[in-house]
Image (cartoon, helix red, strand yellow):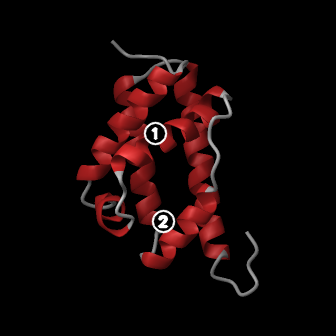
Amino acid sequence: MKRTINNKAAIEFLVVEFYKKVKNDTEIGYIFNDVANFKWETHVPIMVSFWETMLLDKVTYKGNPMLAHIELNKKTPLTPAHFAQWKKLFFDTLNENFEGEGVMEAKKRVEAMKGLMMFKIEQSKNKGFIQ
């Protein structure tokens, strides 16, 4: 039975299932596992707060995801292919486990985030870039 994205428990399930895919992914797993060297027990709750803020309009996230990705891009180039794979894994997780309006909203937010991240990372390469 599929879930709806309507509470924090659903967001936690989404994030945990998504990162299971990411950790084992041959295209982007190394970015999370090796380059960023995520401490999953710390990173997952932050991502739950981020997506809770994005999808449930409950402002629980305090952070700067753009700056984090700009800094990560300095360690290893984050390419359009990486973002496409991130989006694919996120969409796969949504499609496999969820239904309802929240799925379409989540997909819109993922698509917007992908575009904005790629744009900001590219802009960060310019002299005088101000985030």
Quadrant in the rendering for residue 12: top left
- The residue at 28%/42% (across/down) is 20
Residue 14 is tagged as: none
- The residue at 54%/71% (across/down) is 71
Residue 80 is tagged as: 2
Count of numbered marks = 2
Residue 40 or 102: which is nearer the viewer? 40
How crowded pointer 1 is (Cα within 10 Å; few <14, some 14-19, many 20+) is rated as: some
Residue 129 or 122: which is nearer the viewer? 129
In this view, the residue farthest toward the top is 1
In the rendered image, which quarter contains the C terminus? bottom right
Quadrant in the rendering for residue 51: top right
* Residue 1 left/right relative to 124: left
* Residue 45 left/right relative to 67: left
The percent position of residue 81, horizontal first and vertical second, equals 42, 64
Q: Is residue 109 above or below residue 39?
A: above
Quadrant in the rendering for residue 61: top right
